[in-house]
Amino acid sequence: MPLFDLPLEQLREYVSPALPPADLDQFWDRTIAEARTVPLDAVFEPVDNYLSVIDTFDVTFSGFGGDRIRGWLHVPAHLEAGQQLPVVVEYIGYSGGRGLVNQNTRWAQAGYAHFIMDTRGQGYGGVAGDTPDPHPSAGEVNYAGLMTRGADHQDNYYFRRVYVDAFRAVEAAQNHPAVDPSAVVLTGISQGGGITVAAAGLTAGRLDGVIAALPDVPFLQDFPRAIDIAPRGPYPEIAGFLGRHRDRYEPMLAVLNYFDGVHLGRAASVPALFSAAQMDDICPPSTVFASYNNYGADSRAKGSRPAKDIEVYRFNNHEGGQEHHWIKQLQFLRKLLSS
């Protein structure tokens, strides 16, 4: 894939022309308040992961609508009594789930607590999942995949449920005794990166303890541009739907606007390390930069805009920086936690 998007110097200045809904904050205030009327009821069951240096817990907690969401919590084995660790809350890429019990433990290997949220209704591709999506709109699939699911109204849209699950996953992680509730890091790749941006914005001013966000080649950013230019991946699901339903473009954009990381990330108040790949034809770099350039722009927290940085991988597609970028993330957190 050649370089097909804006040149890097233009990417660094690119601002999405999309404007947030006038009632964006009210919508999410109402959504989070409704979710919190249901007890979180986070349950951690020890399970055998066949590893000697990491302990694992099978997690369930109440997400959107009280639906029970699954997850894994990995912690380094042999912690001292009362010891608490910073926790990395990880969200998963599109079509994937939490995976097998020992499939992804790298943050625990680095000495952190590692909470992996299963993504409702996914786990059919990539890695396996265990959490259904029982919402009535889940049966209304007009095009293959999830991008148009419930898109008739913002109250019904699939990612409203996922973003609430992500918010409550932070609360669930904070409930384990081995977790320092004042040191929560959010991370994820692709869809997981998009959920990371959303969760950073939604927790700002609503939930204490989040200290950093690490969105890697994030999806769900700058929907209008992404729908127009992304030739591969989930965004074309929307274009395919609109190619058949020719009168739905403006109404659908109005719904998607409530879930665009370009808008939600504006409220974020914690330091962030993004990544973008210039040959990425699934999450085009301009959509990632639209989010990065807007991140923290109107933080709910008083004071200066949060520190942020972005690593750019010129010759990579949607795989981004992979193991090279994880080293950057480890360095970023080490510096943050030592300051």
Image: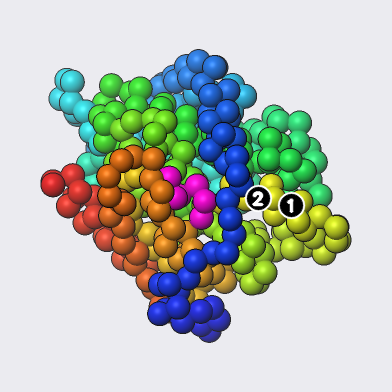
User: Can you say whether 93 is above or below 25 in the image?
Assistant: below
Boundaries of the magenta span: 262-267
Quarter in which the N terminus is drawn: bottom right
Question: SS for tag 2?
Answer: helix
Q: Position of residue 64 (x, y in %)?
A: 59, 28
Instruction: State if disc 2 and disc 1 touch (CB < 8 Å).
Output: yes
Other-residue count near label 1 (Cα within 10 Å), few / some / many at <14 / 14–19 / ≥20: some
Q: Quadrant of residue 97?
A: top right
Q: Is residue 250 visible?
A: yes
Q: Position of residue 21 (x, y in %)?
A: 61, 47
Other-residue count near label 2 (Cα within 10 Å), few / some / many at <14 / 14–19 / ≥20: many
Marks 1 and 2, Cα distance to the nearest angstrom? 6 Å
Question: SS for tag 1?
Answer: helix
Which residue is at the front of the view, 19 or 40?
19
Query: Which three-letter amino acid code belongs to the residue tagged 2?
Result: Leu
Q: Position of residue 28 (x, y in %)?
A: 55, 35
Identify which residue is drawn at 17% across, 20% down: 81
Q: Position of residue 174 (x, y in %)?
A: 34, 27
Marker count (numbered) = 2
Q: To which residue does mark 1 refer?
A: 252
The answer to whether 304 appears left or right of 260 in the picture is: left
User: Can you say whether 4 is above or below 68 in the image?
Assistant: below
Identify which residue is drawn at 76% across, 36% down: 137
Q: Is residue 101 visible?
A: no
Q: To which residue does mark 2 refer?
A: 256
